[in-house]
Amino acid sequence: MSYSNPTFRLITVELPVQSVLTELYTALCQHQRAILVAPPGAGKTTQVPLFLLQQLQQQDPHGSKRILLLEPRRLAVKNTAEFLAQQLGERTGKRVGYRMRQDSRVSAKTRLEVITEGVLLRLLQADPSLDNIHTIIFDEFHERSLTADLGLSLCLQTNQLFRDEIPIQLLIMSATLDTDKLADFLAPVPVIVSKGRQYPIDYHYLARTPTPQQRLTTWQQSVEQALADQEGSILVFLAGQGDIQRLLQQLQHLISDQLSIYPLYGRLTLAEQRQAIAPAPKGQRKIVLATNIAETSLTIEGINCVIDTGLYKQAIFETGSGLTRLHTRTISQASAKQRAGRAGRLQAGHCYRQWSQSHQQALAAQNQPAIKQSDLSALVLQLLACGYGHMDELTWLDQPSPGAWQQAVQLLIKLQAIEPLSHGLALTSQGQQLIKTGLEPRLGKLLVTGAKYGLVNLTCQLISILEHPTQTTRTDLSQAIKLDRTKTQKQLAMQLQAVAKRLPEVNSLAATKISQPLAYIMATAWPDRIAQKQQQQTNSVNYKLANGRGVQLSWPSQQPAPEYLVVSNTQAQQDHSRDIVVSYIAITQADITLAVAHLLEQRAICHWNAKTDRLELSQIIGLGTLVFAQQPNKSIAKATKVSAICDFLQSSDLAGLDWSKELLQWLSRIRLLYKSAPADNNPWPDLSQQWLVDQVNTWLGPYLLDINSGKDLKRLDLLSIIQNMLDYPLQQKMLNLAPSRLRVPSGNSYQIDYTSEPPVLAVKLQELFGLEEVPKVAHGVSVQIHLLSPAGRPLQITQDLAHFWRHSYKEVKKEMQGRYPKHPWPDDPLNGVATAKTKNRR
């Protein structure tokens, strides 16, 4: 690529994206937005920003307008900035600079800044108009991080509110983007497609996809096979740090003077990450074991072989538990394409896919965007910092879940980061401090609280452990804090100490009554995960969290377990039983009350005790679902009592009430009338069991004011209560349409059993002689006749008497006449005389 501007160096390497640069620039000038789709190796990250910088300098050589290039990861930010600066014959900090948390190199001469997505949010908070920004490039947008989605929505709003005359140019770039969806969202927007410079890749599939138990051995064998069959270095994609460490252990025997192995994941220091992506010395090979940090934006020289396990770790926020968990997921086809592309960036390559070829077709097209699966507390905080009180004030490529939004709001209120006002939500001073830390809200709360009480060093160590846990720092954090730090943990702690210096120190902890500083600051950040002991079992203890969830802690049976914990992390069990506590710290009740005093509740409660069968009234002090103190209280409002009784009745399906046979018959009559009435003219109420349960507070509540026990409930005149739900005319109508008894041809009357469907009339056969039509009740419902023998035993069940007399009666007569000779058995029952008497008594 060659540039006409003499201040740019001559770049002779021809890259495919160069053929669309003019078209791209024209699209940006005309529409102020564009989408660039360019396969791996096309040169979009290295060529497009420099071309746009050239155009900007030609257009405004002495201006201060800048271009922002957003990269999803810190490693990509620094590497990209250095590469771009080298193309200009400069070091970073001149025309090309970079900026990320705790590390930046920019100057007054900088016109192209490579930044992390989080830096864009801070720029928007400082200047919502982004007055000195000309163009923003979202690179690798297909990753759809929470921050990238938020950044795009905010930039669109900035153009609408502040930059209507001269909008910021927005360029979205990716190799594997869902173009149709994004184009619809940004419409009208030109979509520019570039060819790629992808060398041929040979794909190798397994005969069948390995089970989880087979994976490690299969991966090891694939690495060994690739080493034997191919030349050059190897990049292995794994789900997470745990898989990397396990495979690294399995491959130790391969390390030699000619072969080195490096891990590559986000929790390593930047220096360790750069060492992993550096080319192997001449004559040597390397294996890089990486997470999807190496999927985009990075080119590792010498790599011509990729081994793809097809897995990645995804942080998924569970609204039910309020917890974010790392789940191992299968990658999408887009990710598989990106990963394979690493093998063909610089030469022909090979990709060993650790799944079957048939499994490839079953992969989803794209990964789910983070905004659909993440904890939104950081997003809510950032939105408020930008001046927006609700997610509906922005347009989104994918709308955040209202449930996840509300949970995030509730958490931030508990952290005292935001407060609800009459006009919406507002940041508190502490919320503003949380944003300054650059950490996610809970960790930011730790740092702010630690700085407040002069515990910066302790807090920074704690955060470094939580951010970069090791096997030895899982479980008891009070012990983990005493262990030697890893290099990564030490580096993060030092960075956090620099941040903490900008936070206010209010008073020393020595002036407080706090007995356990570490536990105290943990409780301020995880108030919803303060846990109370429930039951100690063999080698484990059950706890209940303030949010209502149950968790289990491994604990030796011979030792008493702590009464209270603060739980920072849990792990779900496959059988969906109680979550396992991964990291925690013990805390006293006294420190809990100091740490979360603003969340403690004094409330009157009442509940029905199923064991004593009585209503219990008490006053409690508690946190969420946890109860710290409880005492009897007889002055509870009657409405509260009624609500508690109704809760009990609903939970027991109204079993505590006296359901007499008479009542059940009456209810069945009404239900039959309701079901059989015309749909367009139905005067009858729905008194189904489900309705009675759901609406118990409505129909029974007024009669529960003086109820205190199960005996009181049984004494309720339930029949009268339910009958009074019908006015007098409707009750009279019921008596006519659904009578309790029917007169039969013999002159006797018998009760109808409405609890059966259809209603049943049981009567001796001789009493129905001459009756051809079955009686009907309600709105035309035929009763079911149970024809009885003289001894009262069932002979036949029918709803068609005429058919019975003409066809079945003869067989019945033949069988029964000998048994009951004193009773009439006429040959023609339709003309026989109905009677309840024997022949002699007639």
Image (cartoon, rainbow, N blue to C red):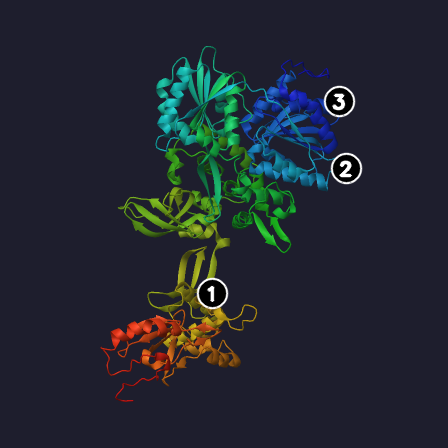
Q: Using a 10 Å C-alpha cutoff, classify the residue at mark 3 as few (fewer than 14 neighbours), some (14 to 19) or many (20 or more).
A: few
Q: Using the image, tell me which numbered label, if any, was put on residue 598.
A: none
Q: Using the image, tell me which numbered label, if any, was put on residue 694.
A: 1
Mark 2 in CB contact with mark 3 (< 8 angstroms)? no
Mark 2 in CB contact with mark 1 (< 8 angstroms)? no
* Image position of 319 (left or right of 131): left
Q: At 62% across and 14% down in the image, what residue appears?
A: 13
Q: Using the image, tell me which numbered label, if any, was put on residue 58.
A: 3
The residue positioned farthest toward the top in the image shown: 283
Q: Position of residue 222 (x, y in %)?
A: 39, 22
Say which amino acid is labelled 2: Glu
The quarter of the image holding the N terminus is top right
Q: Using the image, tell me which numbered label, if any, was put on residue 165.
A: 2
Camera sees residue 605? yes
Q: At 50% across and 79% down in the image, what residue appears?
A: 733
Q: At 35% across and 80% down in the image, what residue appears?
A: 769
Above or below: residue 64 compared with residue 839:
above
Foreground residue among 311 and 366: 366
Mark 1 in CB contact with mark 3 (< 8 angstroms)? no
Helix, strand or loop at label 1? It is helix
The residue positioned farthest toward the front in the image shown: 827
